[in-house]
Image (cartoon, helix red, strand yellow):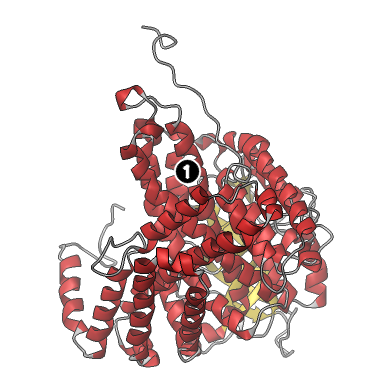
């Protein structure tokens, strides 16, 4: 039989991430239309029209550009020497990669969040305030699945704009921000972020790179030139135009991270094209993000300008981290959206057992149900966090909001990255053998999505960030969080509360037990004297509770405001019927689970998390944890293997 004969696969194309996703539209509609700074109906309609247009381009021309990056020949390469033996360190990237970077400039992916004329689609912060950041992130989430991870350098570009906006000198702002926000691909800059070094990884206090003032006879101030020398172990987006880099400016190594400062580095000379005291040691060979150039860099006589105060580098660059962590989480949200749209489209054309299509097989649908619930939770926790950031940037956030943003951003990134990576495997499985094929895109989604567990901090590192916020606020951050959760539950419509009584009982019990467990702890002592295992369970609990409360709040809005407004229903393109609410209620039940001992555990897994939190904190407080840690250590490190400088590694 010839390949053209017999059964032929029916073709399908992944639908628009906006027009074909009512859950996304409803989430954004609620956030645009509620609160003290709600947008007008006409403004929302304008923004929705823009998002619909962008979604169509993502589905069409931008997906087609991404499809040109489909083999190792399009991956970046490094030419270190020219034909005359001169060191040039020329980085060659694929044409598709360059075109996608150009799309980001033309679409004002960065500029939309700022008070810039280039914010041509939404209007920027001056026009729509806190919603500028929300509008921008809806677009980046939709674009992420076809971006080939070009949003990595864009995230750092966005972060660089924010840092310079807050801490840059007038000269630095005038020189860099217009180029970073440019919508002309010929003049637009992208930025890198150079933090990671060999000794420390996420522990920047062990940074070896040093910076010395170009003029040692002058007291350093922002904008002054320094000579920087060191070795940066991971520099993503090596094809950028500028970079923000941490370097040690104090000879006192005991200062740790307090001895670091932040520098703005121009990577190449505009006139000669020569690198600024930088050598590209080698490109990284990675599991995923294949088209993104990531390199090891030698800095030798590199000139950089001080950004912000001397010795305040970590605090200054934290503004970049908040933004890049949201881009990282947004990449996972976008990947799940694309994966679900792909899997459900395939299920509707694939013949299955019994002669029907795969989508009519409950066994198959049940596979995708948990992924769908996870995605719906992601929409709520991600975009509410984005709106908090938007409020902070627009000067519309209270002190309570600012603390909440610091608490939730690292927790969100860790939670979304881990839960999403588990879902990728289910999505691959839903395609059967085709899911394992490189051309289908699922394998690339798994490889690229896995990096979100590592970029900008692993879940363990981020759980310590959460703990630091609690210590710095003397527990107030968590107390306020629980107060606001309880306020959401108290405001639910009576009928909805009755319908979800077992789930609300479990959620209230989880909040009460978590508060009691943490209330009994000396957090500051735990941060310095215990094994800190409890911090990981706490992070997951915070996000599981947040997801539960926001699902309930969203459903309550649909029952009250949305159902009563024909205008809102028209904007969303969704009718407020009983089936819509029925689906929401079922989703909440699946996520939260029934009351303890009276129903399912729920996908949020809160009962288990509370139990683990309690056990870990009790062991630590009573000094019992050492035994468990020692036994666990013995189990994990029971292998006999050589280590040290004398070992010849085959890795």
In percent of width and height, residue 367 lies at 34, 44
Query: Where is residue 441 shown, x and y percent of the image?
Result: 47, 38
Image quadrant where residue 544 sits: bottom left
The vertical placement of 648 against 224, above or below, is above
Indicate left or right for 605 with 476 as reference: left
Q: Quadrant of residue 122?
A: bottom right
Q: Is residue 547 above or below residue 449?
A: below
**In the image, residue 549 lies at what x, y percent?**
47, 69
Q: Is residue 387 left or right of residue 467?
A: right
Q: In what quadrant of the picture does the N terminus appear?
A: top left
Query: Along the line of sight, which residue is nearer the eye, 144 or 578?
Result: 578
The mark tally for this picture is 1
Tag 1's secondary structure? Answer: helix
Residues 101 and 10: in front is 10
Residue 300 versus residue 345 in the image, above or below? below
Observer-nearest of 578 and 208: 578
At 44% across and 34% down in the image, what residue appears? 438
Q: Is residue 249 left or right of residue 188?
A: left
Query: Is residue 299 in sight in this rendering?
Result: no
Residue 275 vs residue 309, the one in the foreground:
309
528 above or below 244?
A: below
Name the residue furthest top.
1
Query: What's the residue at 37%, 90% (across, down)?
Result: 519
Q: Is residue 550 visible?
A: yes
Mark 1 residue crowding within 10 angstroms, few (<14) / some (14–19) / many (20+): many
Q: Residue at x 44, y 72 (%)?
A: 462
Q: Residue 241: image x %, image y %?
A: 70, 58
Q: Which residue is mark 1?
A: 339
């Amino acid at each position: 039989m010839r390949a053209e004969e017999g059964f032929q696969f029916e073709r399908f194309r992944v639908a628009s991430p906006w027009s074909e996703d009512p859950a996304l539209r409803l989430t954004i509609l609620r956030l645009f239309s509620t609160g003290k700074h709600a947008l007008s109906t006409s403004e929302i309609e304008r923004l929705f029209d823009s998002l619909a247009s962008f979604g169509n381009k993502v589905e069409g021309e931008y997906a087609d550009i991404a499809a040109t990056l489909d083999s190792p020949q399009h991956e970046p390469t490094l030419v270190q020497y020219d034909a005359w033996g001169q060191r040039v360190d020329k980085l060659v990237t694929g044409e598709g990669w360059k075109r996608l970077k150009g799309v980001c400039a033309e679409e004002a992916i960065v500029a939309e969040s700022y008070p810039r004329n280039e914010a041509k689609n939404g209007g920027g912060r001056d026009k729509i305030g806190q919603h500028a950041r929300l509008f921008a992130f809806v677009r980046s989430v939709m674009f992420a699945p076809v971006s080939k991870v070009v949003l990595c350098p864009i995230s750092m570009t966005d972060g660089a704009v924010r840092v310079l906006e807050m801490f840059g000198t007038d000269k630095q702002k005038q020189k860099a921000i217009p180029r970073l926000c440019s919508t002309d691909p010929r003049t637009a800059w992208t930025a890198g972020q150079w933090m990671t070094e060999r000794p420390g990884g996420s522990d920047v206090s062990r940074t070896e790179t040093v910076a010395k003032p170009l003029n040692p006879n002058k007291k350093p101030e922002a904008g002054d030139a320094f000579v920087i020398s060191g070795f940066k172990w991971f520099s993503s987006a090596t094809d950028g135009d500028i970079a923000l880099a941490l370097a040690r400016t104090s000879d006192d190594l005991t200062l740790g991270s307090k001895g670091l400062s932040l520098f703005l580095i121009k990577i190449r000379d505009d006139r000669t094209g020569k690198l600024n005291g930088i050598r590209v040691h080698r490109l990284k060979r990675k599991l995923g993000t294949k088209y993104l150039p990531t390199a090891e860099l030698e800095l030798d006589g590199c000139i950089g300008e001080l950004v912000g105060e001397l010795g305040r580098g970590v605090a200054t660059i934290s503004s970049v981290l908040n933004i890049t962590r949201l881009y990282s989480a947004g990449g996972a949200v976008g990947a799940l959206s694309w994966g679900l749209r792909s899997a459900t489209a395939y299920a509707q054309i694939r013949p299955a057992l019994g002669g029907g299509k795969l989508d009519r097989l409950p066994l198959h649908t049940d596979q995708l149900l948990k992924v769908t619930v996870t995605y719906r939770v992601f929409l709520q926790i991600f975009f509410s966090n984005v709106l908090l950031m938007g409020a902070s940037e627009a000067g519309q956030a209270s002190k309570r909001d600012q603390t909440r943003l610091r608490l939730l951003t690292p927790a969100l990134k860790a939670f979304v990255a881990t839960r999403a990576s588990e879902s990728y495997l289910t999505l691959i499985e839903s395609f059967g053998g085709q899911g394992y094929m490189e051309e289908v895109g699922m394998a690339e989604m798994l490889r690229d999505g896995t990096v979100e567990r590592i970029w900008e901090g692993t879940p363990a590192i981020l759980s310590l960030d959460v703990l630091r916020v609690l210590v710095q606020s003397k527990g107030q951050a968590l107390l306020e969080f629980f107060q606001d959760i309880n306020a959401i539950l108290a405001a639910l419509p009576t009928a909805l509360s009755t319908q979800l009584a077992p789930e609300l009982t479990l959620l209230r019990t989880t909040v009460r037990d978590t508060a009691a467990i943490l209330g009994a702890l000396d957090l500051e002592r735990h941060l310095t004297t215990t094994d800190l295992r409890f911090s990981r369970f706490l992070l997951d609990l915070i996000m599981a509770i947040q997801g539960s409360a926001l699902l309930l709040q969203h459903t309550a809005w649909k029952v009250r405001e949305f159902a009563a407004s024909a205008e809102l229903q028209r904007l969303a393109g969704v009718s407020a019927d009983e089936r819509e609410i029925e689906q929401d209620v079922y989703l909440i039940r699946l996520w939260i689970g029934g009351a303890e001992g009276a129903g399912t555990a729920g996908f949020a897994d809160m009962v288990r998390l509370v139990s683990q939190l309690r056990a870990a904190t009790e062991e630590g407080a009573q000094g019992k944890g050492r035994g468990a840690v020692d036994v666990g250590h013995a189990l994990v490190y029971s292998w006999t293997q050589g280590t040290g400088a004398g070992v010849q590694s085959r890795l």
